[in-house]
Amino acid sequence: QKKEGKLGIALVGLGGYASGQLAPALQQTEHCYLAGIVTGTPSKIPVWKEKYNIPDKNIYSYDNFDSIKDNPDIDIIYVVLPNSMHAEYTIRGFTAGKHVICEKPMALTVADCDKMIAAAKKAGKQLSIGYRLNFEPFNLEMARLGTNKVYGDIKKLTAGFGFLIGDPTQWRLKKDLAGGGPMQDLGIYCVQGICYTSGMVPVAVTAQEGPKTIPDKFTEVEQSLKWQFEMPNGLIAEGEASYGSPMNFLRAEAEKGTFELSPAYNYGRLRGKSPEGEMKFENINQQAKQMDGIALSMKNNQPSIVPGEMGRRDVKLITAVYEAMASGKKVKI
Ligand code: NDP
């Protein structure tokens, strides 16, 4: 039975993020709930059915996914597939007449982002990207302090995200599925952090690939990279992403003091400090907050705070970083 007053979400792709974070978070949400699943692995079905009480009529494979258009229980398609599949499933979701939340990165090319945005418009439905930190208090505080210039102009802005990647066979290390290495997966958080902390979008970039110290794992994608964004006011914002070494920070050095998060991008237990001292915010369930925020904007027909246009902006920036890395030259954006 459809839950009164809540939008029904179908998760597409039952991997680590869908099962470890999104489905549990959907047990805490107010404006949406887990109504259905789409999976290519039949052996996952009994576990999900049992755990989340999902009726058979709301369970789909990738083959019969398009018939979800006839299912009034499903209002929102949430695409949690490998990066290269985001565009196709988002567009199929809109063709089925549903709203779509698409995980980051939105797609592998700006051209695909344009097609996704056009599909949303044609369907008259909303497209949001799974940017959980835009709903998260510590990161929102960085945006407030930076954009309101609470400590004056930012003089230095740096962001880094990395971890040591495990399983060498996973899709994250395959160029065709991931679109690249840690830039696509982790660097995107630094790109976001730089944009929302400065309140600006970069106009040019230079970038350098790091050494491959674990060459067996990185035959297709970069192990690490650094890049330097030139902001419209001349500020150089520096980013770094790595699958070889751990790092997790967002730091702004402003005229009247430094404000920073470390860790900045985890699901919880974030820490921040400013010239006022330790930041004191609750560590909320980020995914619940994000999905409720998005569902509410869909319900009220108000613009998403994480729209497809923002996803497209970031794909454009990531593409420019890779172009700068490959050419060794400064790339205008
Ligand atoms: P996983 O590898 O854990 O899961 C991906 C799932 O996609 C698989 O379990 C499978 O589900 C399905 N799938 C379909 N085709 C393929 C294929 N060819 N290769 C591999 N899997 C396939 O990935 P994650 O859950 O970690 O990531 C999924 C997406 O979510 C990515 O885009 C990632 O960037 C994003 N993500 C976002 C996070 C965030 O904080 N916003 C955090 C983690 C991930 P099935 O068996 O059901 O078909």
Image: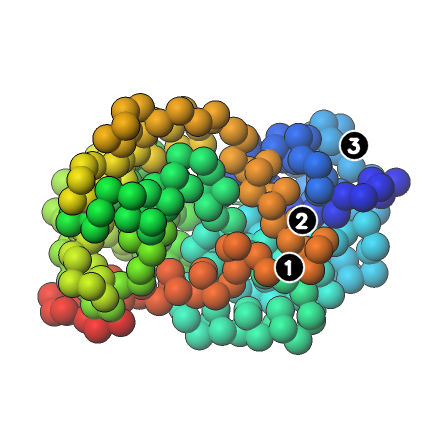
Residue labelled 1 has its Cβ within 8 Å of some atom of ligand 1: no
Residue displayed at 55% across by 48% down:
80
Mark 3 or 2: the one toward you: 2
Residue 314 placed where, x, y %? 38, 60
- Relative to residue 260, is residue 327 drawn left or right? left
- Quickly name the residue at label 2: 296
Q: CA distance from mark 1 to mark 3?
A: 31 Å
Q: Is residue 201 above or below residue 42?
A: below
Q: In the figure, is residue 67 to the left or right of 87? A: right
Q: Is residue 25 visible?
A: yes
Q: Residue at x 23, y 66 (%)?
A: 232
Residue located at (71% from left, 55% from top): 300
Amino acid type at circle 3 is Asn
Task: Find residue 302 and name its label.
Answer: 1
Against 29, is 110 above or below?
A: below
The residue that disc 3 covers is 53
Determine whether the beta carbon of the residue marked 2 sits less than 8 angstroms from the nearest atom of ligand 1.
Answer: no
Is there any visible trace of residue 243 in the rendered image?
no
Callouts 3 and 2 close, C-beta under 8 Å: no
- Give the spatial CA distance, label 3 vs label 2: 24 Å
Q: Earlier in the sequence, mark 1 or mark 2?
A: 2
Amino acid beneath label 2: Leu
Q: Which numbered tag is attached to residue 236?
A: none
User: For the C terminus, which image quadrant?
Assistant: bottom left
Q: Quadrant of residue 327?
A: bottom left
Q: Are marks 1 and 2 in contact (CB under 8 Å)?
A: yes
